Amino acid sequence: MSLLSKLKETVIGLRAGRVTFPYPRKAREAPAKYRGRPIFDGTKCIGCAGCANNCPAREILVIDVCQEIRILQYLGRRCTYCGRCADLCPEKAITMSGEYETATDRIGDLQQRLELFMSTCQRCGRCFKEPSALERLQMKGYRFDDLANERWVFRSQSYLQGAPPADDINLDLD
Amino acid sequence: MLETLCQKMFGRSLWVYHANSGGCNGCDIEVLAVLTPYYDAERFGIKLVGSPRHADAMLCQGPAMRATASALRRAYDAMPAPKLVFAIGSCACGGGVWHDSYSVLGPVERVIPVNYYIPGCPPRPEAIIYGVAVAAGLVDKRTAPVQFKQLELPIPRYHPSDLRGGGELVVYERSEKI
């Protein structure tokens, strides 16, 4: 009986195979949903600092050197890779990469620094507020003055001659 | 300098001691995953020991807290002389999300000197193995600080000094538009 059980154990041991990953010799990809280090794309960034305002670890610093130059500094020390900055970036300048091999002996190696020009008013040199979506519609000829009924009221006459300017919005005459 | 010293001192096998000074236990579980057969860390001679007196390296998890800072310092002092400290996770590297709360002093380097940093919340078991391999000189580190600098304004600025031509046709020199 004991010999039989030993034989059974041997068979199980032979069939078990190997489970160890050959990790440091062969690179191992992170799963598709894994969030690693965020990558900041300086060519897309507009410097709105929304990431800095919403970072739970307060790890993105905004330094305004002067009126026109803004430095966006991501330190990466206590970043929890939550991906909130990538979520709310309006220009999708931040992507969460699958990079996880970020071990280092200097903590400064993790930082990313963007130095951006902020566009200012060319006449007075101060920053100006971007027109909101409603104000931009006004510039195109729409007017949102019927706030109680939430109706679009059309102001410009030039659009009314041919086809309706927008298919999905019902427009009333002024 | 540090790497050559590490290769010399810790070339053969690295006995690690596992210190949690107030973390959430996430990094502990990842360190334990490193020691399972899947990521068999004993291939590289990495062995977990129970006492800091036997250890070559200390794996720190969790920030330095008001209550545990002295215990962490005592554990560090108890380790024999060539010693390495790894800070594992965002809490140990930078203080964590609650870095500015009452009971958190900050990263563990406020209390003990840290040699290697493994960021992540928690870091993958591969990342921990990678950090130990960087310390042992098996692989090179892959991170470097990134700096981006805009050299020109992204939108054209019409300075009068850059305008060429006269009369009706005025050409802006920097951009090819009229």
Image: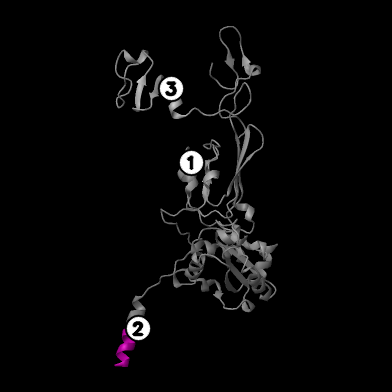
10 Å neighbourhood of mark 2: few (<14), some, or many (≥20)?
Answer: few
Q: Chain of mark 2?
A: A
Side (left or right) of B62 relative to A164: right
Q: In this orientation, which residue lies closer to the viewer: A71 or B151?
A: A71
**Which residue sits at x=34%, y=88%?**
A6
Q: CA distance from mark 1 to mark 2?
A: 58 Å
Residue beneath disc 2: A10
Q: In this orientation, which residue lies closer to the viewer: B108 or A13?
A: B108
Q: Is residue B119 above or below residue B14?
A: above
The residue mark sitting in front, 1 or 2, is 1
Give, as a three-letter code, the residue at label 2. Answer: Thr
Give, as a three-letter code, the residue at label 1. Answer: Cys
Residue B139 screen position, x and y as percent? 58, 61
- Comes first in the chain, label 2 or label 3: 2
Residue beneath disc 3: A138
Secondary-structure class at tag 1: loop
Residue beneath disc 1: A89
**Which residue sits at x=51%, y=71%?**
B41
Q: Can residue B47 be seen at all in this image of the molecule?
A: yes
